[in-house]
Image (tube, rainbow, N blue to C red):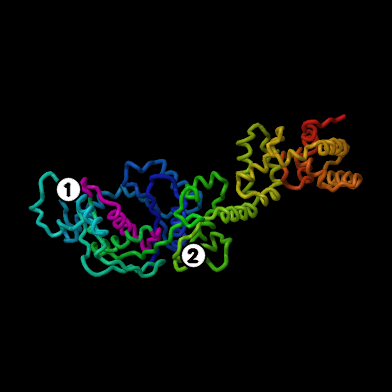
Amino acid sequence: MTVVTRFAPSPTGFLHIGGARTALFNWLFARHHGGVYRLRIEDTDRKRSTPEAISAIEDGLTWLGIDHDDKIVFQSHNIQRHKDAVKQLLEGGHAYRCYCSPEELMEMRETARTEGRSVSYDRRWRDRDPADAPSGISPTIRIKMPLEGETTIDDAVQGPVTLQNSELDDFILMRSDNTPTYMHSVVVDDHDMGITHIVRGDDHLNNAFRQYHLYRAFGWDRPVFAHIPLIHGADGQKLSKRHGALGVDAYRDMGYIPDAIRNYLLRLGWSHGDHEIISSKQAIEWFDLDAIGKSPSRFDFDRLENLNSHYIANMPDDILIDPLVAAILGIVPDIDEKNLRIRALQLLEPLKKRAKNLNELTESALFIAQRPNYPLENSKAAKFLNPSGVKLLEEMHGALNEIMDWTLNSVEERIRVMSEAQSLGLSKFAQPLRAALTGSNTSPGIFEILAVLGKEESLRRIADVPNVNLP
């Protein structure tokens, strides 16, 4: 049997981070078994489904590297097939027309609520003669669910789960306006797409019992159900925006990289020994449903940030340099791109080891293209430009100006000689110099910066510091 999985989002908004994890698990399971992973857009809610949301879902999945096989299936294109399937159930005696008015249904719900029952529809039209149908009522079509016994689903994650059939209602397959319901359309689409394993959030577990009997009514083989626990916030509460329940595009805008997001989502509810850093190749090799936990996982921004830092620090420079240069040019467009690229590459190794995200990397590298603006926004850096710091900058400007062969070694030697001559620690010179060159109190090595900026630019930045008086 060829494993076939699917991710089936409703395009009513962005690609939620929980949805991205569901897509990832489906993709990994299919790839692990050499199977097929498909994408279906459940766009039958025409009022809420938008082209922008569809694009956001496709773009988010592409950015994450979750590629689908075959063409995208749009559920709205299959409505006639869904209608024909309802007719099949009617003709086979597995469904019936219900002529209840909205007022009758409301009364049933109130009665069920009063009696503490979960099932609100009393099946009054299940065995009634259609000849009794009132005029002016367009019927819904409902499935005939079993009235007695119990249903057990052997879930690949949750294990055997049993529900009394008395808790299952004769749910609607076709609304009174002749449109199919989600519960019905999903089953028909999954069957027609050849889906063998349905991997989704455990908030759909109740739906699985209804869909189980719909498969049986059609006489179709049922897929394997695997309901994965939802993601909670760090406080154990249902995931919300304050916890990180954002669209994938928001994480991209915050400077996270796809490899880190995939690795983090993989570890939210799935594990392989003590491994934390897991490449896509390893994930495909190791992933299976039996390693998914039964308890909700907790979204932790600190862990995600640590993973992101790791991946940025280990990204090849030739891959990282392009987005970095593009980001800097977006802020400082009127500079020589070739010179910027050369300088950024020389400092990229130490810069990327300090960055928690790409935005932070850009911010820390901005000094390469942009001179500090005074007064400095960085108060920690500004405090080093006090009178004693300014005096040292004046002395360093004179000493550095005498260097003919400007190299890392030559600038380092000159400043170290000054430090020893004045019996001052090297940091006393480095701190005001760093503030003058970068506008920050943290940066790559100060001698590397001097070497990369060059003599003319370095001296110019020192001279720009307020209160510096040069001969």
Q: Is 187 colored magenta in this rendering?
A: yes
Let me know if residue 333 appears in the view.
yes
Q: Which residue is farthest right?
A: 421
Measured as percent of width and height from the top left, residue 326 is found at 61, 40
Q: Which residue is mark 2?
A: 287
Q: Which residue is mark 1?
A: 101
Quadrant in which the C terminus is drawn: top right
Which is nearer the eye, 151 or 345? 151
Residue 99 is left or right of residue 362, and the answer is left
State the residue at coordinates (83%, 47%): 426
Q: Position of residue 309 (x, y in %)?
A: 62, 53
User: Magenta residues, as a range?
Assistant: 175-202
Give residue 354's position: percent from left, percent from top.
67, 50
Is 383 contained in the magenta span? Answer: no
Crowd tier of the residue under label 2, counting other residues whose Cα lies within 10 Å: few below 14, some 14–19, many 20 or above? many
- Indicate the position of residue 158 as horizontal and vertical percent values: 40, 67
Q: Amino acid at mark 2?
A: Phe
